[in-house]
Image (spheres, grey):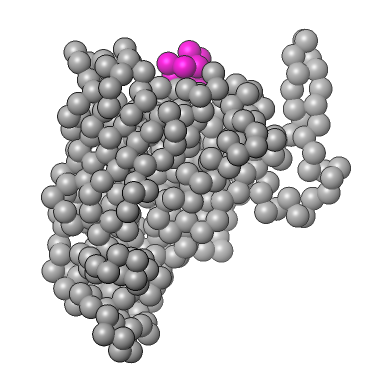
């Protein structure tokens, strides 16, 4: 299993399992003389950590990060930055009944077929616990972007759909996103989502979601044809997140409902500066950033761990049924928001180092 690293110059490698003593990552390619300490990373981890509301898993992890290397007197040295988070609240006994049984929708069966080992304790390496280190790497990436651009930029993610319930984009409010339990930009939809989550839990089920990530303040010119396109790298980054089953840039799949007339982003010039009249292509044309907001969305499937009994098989190739106990997110899309932000940040940081 050698595919634990992503991106090229700004490169990070994660390690650890859900119920191991710790998880961690090594971030390489960070320029020297960037001011960095744990306080720069912790706020982003706090957004992702479990147990913060009744709408997420009740696993209670502090997710406190420690920097082990790559920093001297509060500044990056240009050498690998090693980060670690200790696992404090793993309850492996919740998974003892799953030792020889495959959970439908999880990676249990495919990992067993590929590696011949059944790590039943929280899914081991396939667990979304690993994403905490992506968020930590993303915090470092934001510092790199700031140094390279030397101008204001922003990366912000939001939950835009749970199940079949969508936000009203006319109500989008960036300031409200971090003031509710769903990272939702539309205040009016919150009661509906609360009822959906509660109903799903009562039924022993779960819900999928769509997350939108926006990045503003990025100049034109990031990305390179034909196999290093910015949007292809973003798509890969988002697809590596647990439970993600689809990614789109700009109008994405809704482009099929448009025409060549309505979908094209027309241009004009004002005060000797060019600008676009729309952003249907999500700030990327031909794989290269246009200078507009970069807009990416991804869909996460409903949490596969549910209380309702499901048909499955075991390692002895016998048919059986399973009901998954333990502490699980009724909608993994909620905590996927800061993870999506992190993957946007690491991809943009890598492209800044490569093309600026």
Vertical side of 192 occupied by 83: above or below? above
Vertical side of 312 occupied by 196: above or below? above
Q: Which residues are magenta?
A: 146-153
Q: Position of residue 278 (x, y in %)?
A: 74, 34
Residue found 20% across the figure and 70% down from its top: 95
Residue 151 vs residue 78, the one in the foreground: 78
Q: Position of residue 18 (x, y in %)?
A: 23, 55
Q: Is residue 170 visible?
A: no
Judged left or right of residue 73, residue 197 is right
Judged left or right of residue 139, residue 217 is right
Q: Position of residue 93 (x, y in %)?
A: 13, 69
Query: Which of the 4 image quadrants contains residue 307?
Result: bottom left
Vertical side of 87 occupied by 145: above or below? above
Query: Which of the 4 image quadrants contains residue 260?
Result: top right
Q: Position of residue 26 (x, y in %)?
A: 28, 35
Judged left or right of residue 48, residue 297 is right
Residue found 70% across the figure and 34% down from its top: 285
Asked if residue 152 is among those painted magenta in the image, a careful observer would answer: yes
Residue 31 vs residue 63, the one in the foreground: 31
Position of the C terminus, as image quadrant, is top right
Residue found 77% across the figure and 30% down from its top: 277
Residue 134 vs residue 32, the one in the foreground: 32
Q: Is residue 11 visible?
A: yes
Residue 8 vs residue 164, the one in the foreground: 8
Asked if residue 311 is among those painted magenta in the image, a careful observer would answer: no
Residue found 56% across the figure and 51% down from its top: 247
């Amino acid at each position: 299993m050698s595919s634990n690293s992503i991106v090229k110059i700004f490169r990070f490698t994660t390690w650890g399992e859900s119920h191991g003593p710790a998880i961690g990552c090594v971030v390489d390619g960070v320029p020297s003389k960037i001011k960095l300490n744990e306080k720069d990373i912790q706020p982003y981890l706090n957004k992702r950590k479990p147990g913060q509301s009744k709408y997420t898993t009740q696993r209670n992890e502090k997710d406190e990060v420690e920097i082990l290397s790559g920093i001297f007197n509060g500044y990056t040295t240009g050498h690998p930055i090693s980060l670690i988070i200790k696992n404090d609240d793993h309850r492996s006994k919740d998974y003892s009944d799953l030792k020889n049984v495959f959970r439908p929708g999880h990676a249990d069966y495919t990992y067993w077929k590929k590696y011949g080992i059944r790590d039943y304790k929280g899914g081991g390496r396939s667990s979304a616990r690993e994403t905490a280190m992506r968020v930590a790497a993303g915090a470092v990436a934001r510092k790199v972007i700031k140094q390279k651009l030397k101008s204001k930029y922003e990366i912000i993610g939001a939950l835009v759909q749970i199940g079949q319930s969508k936000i009203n984009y006319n109500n989008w409010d960036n300031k409200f996103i971090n003031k509710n339990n769903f990272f939702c930009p539309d205040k009016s939809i919150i009661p509906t989502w609360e009822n959906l989550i509660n109903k799903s839990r009562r039924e022993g089920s779960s819900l999928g979601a769509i997350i939108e990530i926006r990045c503003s303040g990025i100049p034109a010119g990031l990305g390179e044809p034909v196999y290093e396109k910015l949007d292809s790298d973003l798509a890969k980054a988002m697809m590596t997140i647990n439970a993600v089953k689809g990614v789109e840039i700009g109008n994405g799949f809704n482009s099929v409902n448009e025409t060549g007339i309505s979908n094209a982003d027309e241009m004009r010039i004002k005060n000797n500066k060019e600008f676009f009249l729309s952003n249907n292509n999500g700030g990327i044309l031909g794989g290269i950033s246009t200078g507009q907001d970069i807009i990416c969305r991804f869909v996460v499937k409903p949490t596969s761990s549910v209380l309702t009994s499901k048909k499955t098989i075991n390692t002895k190739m016998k048919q059986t049924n399973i009901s998954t106990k333990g502490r699980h997110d009724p909608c993994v899309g909620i905590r996927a928001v800061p993870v999506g932000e992190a993957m946007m940040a690491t991809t943009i940081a890598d492209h800044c180092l490569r093309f600026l």
